[in-house]
Amino acid sequence: MPSDLQSRKTKSYSQSPYLKSPMYASVNMVSVEATTSGEMAASVRQTEDPLIAALPPNTDYITYLTILEYQLTPQNLSTLNRLLQDDDGTLAAEIGWDLLKLVLPMLRVEPDKARECLDIIARRGNPREVIIRVAEELERLGHDESDAEADPAENDDDLPTFVGEAPRVHLGDMALRGMPKPSIHEALVNHPEHEEDGPDAVVEEVNFRALLNMLGLLHPRIKTAYPSRFLATSLPAALSAYRRLSMNTESTFSFLRTLTKLVTKKRPALPPRVSTSNVLSTTSTNDTSGDIVSAPLPDPEYKTETGTAPRAVADNEAAINQRLVQAVLLEVIDEYTAASSDPQPPLTARLRVEFEPHSVTSLRRSQLDTLTRNEHARRADNLRRTFMTTSQDLKLDIDTAIRKHNEVYPEEPVAEEDNDYPTSPSQIPFSATGLLLMYSAQQYSEATSKQAFTAADMNSRININQVLEAIDRQYESDTRLRHSAPAIDSILSLLYLIFCTPPTSSNTPTHSVEDETLLLATCNTLQDIFTSCPDTDLRDNAYHIATHLVHGHCQRNTRLKAMKGILEADVTAAVSPIHEAQAGNLKSIAVDWLKDEIYPTQAIQQMMSRTLDEEDRGLPLSVVAELAELLFPAKQIPDVPDSSSEQDREQAMEGFAAELPFYISSLNLLCLVARSHEEQGPSEGSVGGTVSDVSAVEAGLDVVLVRGEVMLATLERWKDYLVGRMSKGETAGTGEGNGLEVDGISLPDIFALEDAVGRTREMLQAES
């Protein structure tokens, strides 16, 4: 709370005649001395509306607030609205800040009247005081009722007792003699539209959106030398409330509209005029956004400020304000993407359907079509576009922000003077994950709306290395990002557009990332997603992008390092350590990449031709000999278990099952190597497989075949063991072969092993 506003809550109390004497200084402000209140009540005719009869100057403002607390109901809320608009703004300025706690509960039963009242308060009340109350109400949202009842603003236990002053004594709750006692809560319960079992979360979301709308009206009214102090008070409170609530689409839309209002300069409305005929000078209408439109009053305290701020101060404040709203926007997209309760449609899969329909199965395309037509998907797409338009309204330059963030990382920011509020824009950090998500939304929007989007379109606006550096760093440091499927999908969609979109033309290669360390780090990120993400679609997308990266964007030595790092599974390798449960699958992918480099298909050749020169495409067959120890690790295969120890058998089965996909891929590669050896050289269709020294190739292939023979012999014993267990289970009825797996190994994997072993044995025998 701004330091110059901390005493603002008691400002209007000073006008009450009941507070002139020190004996009343410690009494709760909401309570009124019973005798005086009784005399006032006696002067009011029973047939007259108390809200009108007690209107100041008939009573002071504190007494009038107390009467409202007892008498205001959803039925007479329209009367209060008329009274607040019927004067020159004094009533709203004096009591508006304290009406929030009375009006907010009525949003549940009288939403239209309650919203109108809050709108009047925001437009005619004292904006500096009302903003503080709005921030306090936002801080209460999302907490337990027991926590919400403890109002720190009304608790004066921490007020000091001066020397010679008697200790404060709490007199308890006080009542007005001669006045009825129905509370607002009782009036709401007795309201015909009250729902006893209404969810509190829904009520709080309605209150949240109403309070956000008030902030959008209040902040533009404030005329002060340091408006950023008020933004630094209300925006963190709003963001905290947003995080505690469900973060659904409606609340996010409301937040974005509020941010736009804070920076959009509209033509000021004409000020209200009080007519002698008691005709309302301001009528409420609705604009296109559904907000109630009335003429806002100027800041009543602006005239009390002496002088104007220097130009340098004003410029600095404008920069701080802009940075604040931009930072909050990035936090909102970060929070919504990572933790929203609404389903979010997949982005990467839709891009693959757009640019590579052949890479997506017909069943998956049908599922995506159904999902795209879903109402939630359409609203999510609308929200994504709203994020983009809001960033443009806030003048957020995402490209520059990413570049500057990379330039200062990992250096710590310069320590500045400890202040309650930011004194320079550099003190307000941007969410790095939010920047990436915003950039991803921007690129996805352009890719899906542009007729001929290419990878060059991305490189024309920002250095791709900057994006990859930010992705790799944030994925490693942001734990929540790694556990959020929508956030991972956004990152994958960005990587897809970088590495998988078509080139500028069929003959001209597009940009190529030349930083080897950066490419290996990106490959590492994709491997981690593949091995750790439980979503099968995201894992498939990560594999697809990594395949494009390795074959189409890495130089020959970089490709070899990437595959070797995976096969080594070494923490010191350029690629991060492999998750143990997925080690076999990832090693199998590395073997398949190597096979495609030596014996490329037409699709792989197209990947290579996009960015690589012809002499740098593919790998020679001699690479297999260099990696023979990693490709055919016969000594690392566990021995076939015997019946001596059940624990040893389970341990051996678990280790073999984890590596089985890798063993099958290695056998398939061994078949191709044996065929090449039989033909005395690489196959005709291989790219990069021509070797001048045929004898050296043959010598290397001989080493490969020897190691492959040893590995094949071990795997033959495993094949016989598993098939025997399966057959034994079927005949004996032990259940081991009656299900979909045998000792943790699926039947399809057993059949694949049996087929690979048989084909490899046949090929080796033919070669010999």
Image (spheres, rainbow, N blue to C red):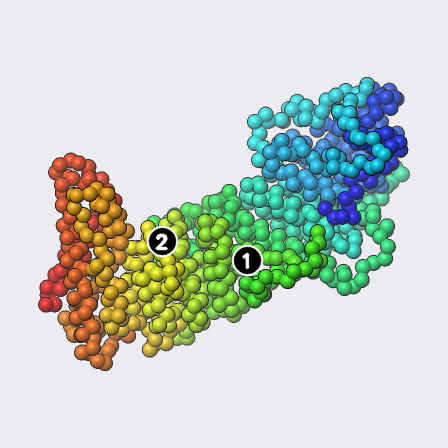
Looking at the rendered structure, the secondary structure element under dot 2 is loop
Looking at the rendered structure, the secondary structure element under dot 1 is helix
Amino acid type at circle 2 is His
The quarter of the displayed image where residue 409 is located: bottom right
Q: Nearer the viewer, residue 268 or 674?
A: 674
Labelled disc at residue 238: none
Task: Give the image location of residue 266, x and y in percent.
Answer: 72, 54
Tell me which label, 1 or 2, sits earlier in the chain: 1
User: From the viewer's perspective, is the residue at label 1 or at label 2 nearer?
Assistant: 2
Residue occupying image coordinates x 59% and y 57%? 430
On screen, residue 527 above or below 511: above
Q: Nearer the viewer, residue 308 or 85?
A: 308
**How many numbered marks does the figure carry?**
2
Instruction: Count residues near mark 2 (Cα–Cα under 10 Å), then give few for <14, some for 14-19, many for 20+.
Output: some
Residue occupying image coordinates x 83% and y 48%? 301
How far, Cα to Cα, is label 1 from label 2? 26 Å
Residue occupying image coordinates x 34% and y 72%? 556
Task: Give the image location of residue 370, x and y in percent.
Answer: 41, 46
Instruction: Count residues near mark 1 (Cα–Cα under 10 Å), then give few for <14, some for 14-19, many for 20+.
Output: many
State the residue lying farthest toward the front.
Answer: 163
Which quadrant of the figure contains the C terminus? bottom left
| Mark 1 lies on residue | 432
| Mark 2 lies on residue | 579
Q: Answer with left or right where residue 182 lies relative to residue 383.
A: right
Residue occupying image coordinates x 49% and y 60%? 473
Amino acid type at circle 1 is Ala
Q: Is residue 542 visible?
A: no
Task: Give the image location of residue 745, x and y in percent.
Answer: 24, 46
Task: Give the image location of residue 391, x and y in percent.
Answer: 60, 57
Q: Answer with left or right where residue 74 lies relative to residue 746.
A: right
The quarter of the displayed image where residue 15 is located: top right
Q: Nearer the viewer, residue 22 or 324?
A: 22
